[in-house]
Image: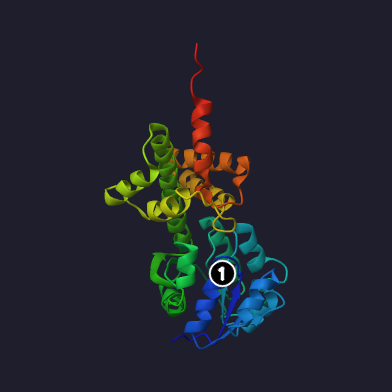
Amino acid sequence: MTDFATIGFIGTGVMGEPMCRNLSSKLDVRIIAYDLRREPLERLGDAGIEAASGVGDVAKAANLVLLSLPGNSEVEEVCLGEGGIAAAGAPGLVVADLSTCAAESARTVGEGLAEAGILFADAPVTRTAKAALDGTLSIMVGGDKALFDRLTPVLSTMGTDITHAGPVGAGQQCKLLNNMVCVQTVVALAEALTMARRAGVDPDVLFDILGKGSANSFALQNHGMKSMLPGIFREGVYPTRYALKDIGYALDLARETGVDARGAELAQALLSATAARGFGENYYPALVNIVDDIQTDDAPAED
């Protein structure tokens, strides 16, 4: 049960659309959604979800607005821009941001909304697009504990693990560190796969062995087994440019905390090279495609 009679959802992309659909199927409340693209709104309309004509309409109609947007600039524009949530929403409205942003941006948004009497929590999600479809995401929430308690029944329609990370910004910090670790693990898998191929080891056998030992991980089972081995790097599923954005946010956090995050810097360089080679819109494990080239480029010249 939830005390929110009408819930708004802004941003119905790869993750947002299935999250919105789960929300609708598990809660008996009015849901109104908005996206720049009409196609997902038309599909959600089949589930009884109303389509709004703009951000302001969502803010005026809803008691709670959920956001699933690309990053800092989009969230700040939707929340604080002209005709956005701060301008259109009534005092007492609650906004929960499911996007991945910098913690500083989350705090800026929270402070700006607070001036309009609007409550805010950052609630980024992790796990795969399939987890969004199945409603098994992990969601980490930054905000007041009382607000977290109010949001938990809603977030539980989309995820199985809902965790209070701390004050506003803490959810984003935990999400960025999660992504940083995952990206670095994918880099290690790409290097191991390249070495195995050069050494004549069957890559399927290698990954099977890694999965049975201490090197097993979420990244191996998903990014490695399902993407790297078959060479499938679909567009629209956490593309390289998103991973590059998130590792950049993580490195901003490293600088703020005085940490020399060399592993993250190497991951950022490899992601940048991957995007430069034309894989910017592909699922980011596509970085395996250029690891071998980079190793060759860096090899010392023969006399």
Residue 95, visible in the rendered structure: no
Foreground pick, 114 / 120: 120
Q: Residue at x 48, y 68 (%)?
A: 132
Colour mode?
A: rainbow
Left or right of 270? Residue 85 is: right
Q: Is residue 221 above or below residue 161?
A: above
* Label 1: how many Cα within 10 Å (few below 14, some 14–19, many 20+): many
* Residue extending farthest left: 213
* Secondary structure under the numbered disc 1 in the rendered image: helix
Foreground pick, 247 / 127: 127
Q: Residue at x 49, y 23 (%)?
A: 299
Give the tally of numbered discs.
1
Quadrant hosting residue 84: bottom right
Residue 24 location, x and y as percent? 53, 82
Residue 182 location, x and y as percent? 42, 51
Q: Is residue 178 above or below residue 189?
A: below
The residue type indicated by label 1 comes to: Gly
Left or right of 19? Residue 1 is: left
Foreground pick, 95 / 41: 41
Residue 225 location, x and y as percent? 41, 52
* Residue extending farthest top: 303
Residue 56 location, x and y as percent? 69, 76
Tell me the residue that label 1 is attached to.
Answer: 16
Residue 121, visible in the rendered structure: yes
Q: Is residue 185 above or below residue 139?
A: above
Q: Quadrant of the N terminus?
A: bottom left
